[in-house]
Image (tube, rainbow, N blue to C red):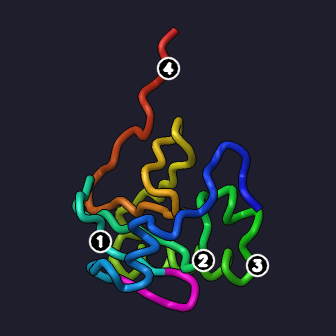
Amino acid sequence: MSVAGLPPYDDANIFARILRGEIPCKRVHEDAHALAFHDINPQAPVHVLVIPKGRYVSVADFAANGTDAEVAGFWRAVAKVAKDLGLEAGGYRVLTNMGEDGGQEVPHFHVHIFGGRRIGRMVPRAEG
């Protein structure tokens, strides 16, 4: 089932190609439900992407169509990666973008884990 406003899943997207081993990545974690790897253009001292192994376009698609095991396994992997990277003590940010207005660039659901420094405000305050 597709999610309103989003294109269908594209098997040629970069994360699908990484999952198939066509494009290398610097792995941090891999299990039955998720793959985590360092971002090639880091925006913080620690910037890791975590992607589910299923064909999900966005967080809405994943929430609507992922199995309970996939959803739980994915979020457990996100928490494990942050812990294994030593980010729990100082804190970290988990971010996902959805759709054009949300800034989603790759049509495969993924989260960013940012850490290693104070991240600051996520979104500037609205004016007016």
Which residue is the site of mark 1? 38
Q: Amino acid at mark 3?
A: Asp
Q: Are marks 3 and 2 in contact (CB under 8 Å)?
A: no
Residue at 35 percent across and 42 percent down: it is 120
Which image quadrant for residue 86? bottom left
Q: Residue furthest bottom?
A: 32
User: Label 2 crowding class (10 Å Cα cut-off): few <14, some 14-19, many 20+?
Assistant: some
Dot 4 or dot 2: first in sequence order is: 2
Q: Is residue 128 magenta?
A: no
The spot of residue 82 in percent (x, y) is 42, 73
Q: Is residue 83 above or below residue 95?
A: below
Mark identifier at residue 126:
4
Tags 1 and 2 in contact by the CB under 8 Å rule? Answer: no
**Is 24 drawn above or below residue 41 in the view shown?**
below
Question: Mark 3 or 1 closer to N-term?
Answer: 1
Mark 3 or mark 2, which is nearer to you? 2
Is 97 located above or below residue 37 in the figure?
A: above
**Kind of element beneath mark 4:** loop
The residue beneath circle 3 is 68
Which amino acid is tagged 2?
Gly
Q: Which residues are magenta?
A: 28-34
Circle nearer the viewer, 4 or 1: 1
